[in-house]
Amino acid sequence: MKISIRTAAVSLAFFLTQCAAVKSDKADLVITHVNVIDVITGTVQPDQNVVVSNGLIQRIESAEKAPQRATQRLDGTGKYLMPGLWDMHVHFRGGDTLTEANKNLLPLYMAHGITTVRDAGGDLTPAVYAWREQINAGKLAGPRIFTSGPKIDGPGGTWPGSLAVETPAQVTVALDSLQKLRVDYVKIYESKISGEAFLNVITEAEKRGLKTTGHMPYTVTLREASERGLDASEHLYYVFKGCSSREDSLTAAVKQSLLTPKPLGLFAVLPTIYKTYDPTVAAAMFKTLAERKTAVVPTLFIQKTLAEITEQDHARDTMLAYIDPRIQATYMGRYNNAKRQPKETVAFGKKLSAKFMSMIPEMQAAGVTILAGSDSGPFNSFVYPGASLQGELELLVRAGLTPAQALRTATINGATFMGVADQSGSIGAGKYADLLLLAQNPLADINNIKKLDAVVSRGKVYSAQDLSESVKKIKRK
């Protein structure tokens, strides 16, 4: 069984806080007369009191009972309480010169109801660990952070800070270093890694009980990776390839091209995959992912944003005012590349977005675990922290999920994937008090996640005004 390296420590902290809680008959916080959303069943428990102490939910009981004595009371009459949102794919990166700019993104997550993020690799690992320590100690307001630390790639990989692996010995050294860092999972990137090294990383990480996710090189099949134990595929490009009736021959062609001066890349192969997409093959692929428990992080929002990037006037985006100019500068790379693309390429990008959307309900029906992730961070143009995760949930519903199913992708599914569903991801006694108080029911309309009355993080209440003030501090004049 795979567990996070931090699980034992977290469990000890959980036990100690529970012990502390029983020493006092006065709670820290009571949310009264609130409608509690059960994201697992997609139902609502009306008119409940939720009691919180030491950052944990102590109990949930009918509001007919006399409310618990508490230091702070929050009136939830007519409102809805749900778990805080999880963004399962974000990035903190850009080197030392962007450290502070990345740190200033943390309030944006909180202001949009995101109380947990999964950092999918970058080059700011020491800073990310420092922020996490400060957040956990209550010295810095921000979401809980799970991190992969540096990515694993091949020699000369795209992203700075990546660990280069080619031989089995190098795989061992890389995983040793990540375990020393006590990362929460291993992120593999495909820019330069060989198919053999990619699969070896999965196999060796599996032996160590480490979770693996990543971008899959087109020199291997997703079935191979899933059978080796890949825990999640980031984005839909790699699942898409597994839905082609010619996946094997395309894989062979990509391998052969590596021996030539012009190797085939992902984007060169996508049009052929699109033409050879086979619903029967896709159904079999989704069944394999479900059976092997390989989750998928679709990142529909960034796909749509980049496909339409030259058609939107992003200079008018209200969120730009909260993004450091140095991060804004990183946005221009993808934008300038898009401006140079032929019209046919732009049109294909839109077709691909629509195709990806059509895959979502089929994966859901097949039992594939879907994880909501935005891919926000430096270099990912106009994909703003917080707002983009809300956009991702809107697209998941537009693709065919119910609001309840979409909410699960950003709550309990993330917690389950990270091995902490007993502590987070839903509302229950003994779980972390990371909560959203909403003015209206998100099960009726997914856009109601934007109607935040308050965010509770580690039991501390941040009112809508508090959240507004926190982002005003990072707003450019």
Image: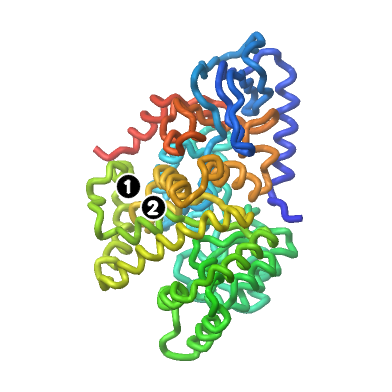
Q: Residues within 10 Å of mark 2 (few under 14, many from 20)?
A: some
Q: Give the position of the N terminus as an image quadrant.
A: bottom right
- Disc 1 + disc 2, Cβ < 8 Å: yes
Residue visible at 63% across and 32% down in the picture: 427
Quadrant in the picture for residue 386: top left
Residue 253 in view, yes or no:
yes
Position in image of residue 198 (x %, y %): 60, 73
Q: Is 320 located above or below residue 460 in the figure? A: below
Q: What label sits on residue 324 in the rendered view?
A: 1
Toward the top, the furthest residue is 66
**Number of disc labels:** 2
Position in image of residue 439 (x %, y %): 45, 25
Left or right position of 171 against 340: right
Distance, label 1 to label 2, CA atoms, is 9 Å
Left or right position of 329 against 124: left
Position in image of residue 352 (x %, y %): 40, 65
The foreground one among 414 and 139 is: 414
Q: What label sits on residue 98 in the rendered view?
A: 2
Quadrant in the picture for residue 81: top right
Looking at the picture, the colour scheme in use is rainbow
Task: Assign a secondary structure to mark 1.
Answer: loop
Q: Which of marks 1 and 2 is in front?
A: 1
Q: Is 267 located above or below residue 46 in the figure? A: below
Q: Which amino acid does label 2 sit on?
A: Leu
Q: Residues within 10 Å of mark 1 (few under 14, many from 20)?
A: some
Q: Which amino acid does label 1 sit on?
A: Asp
Task: Assign a secondary structure to mark 2.
Answer: helix
The foreground one among 352 and 129 is: 352
Residue visible at 26% across and 73% down in the picture: 342
The foreground one among 425 and 362 is: 362
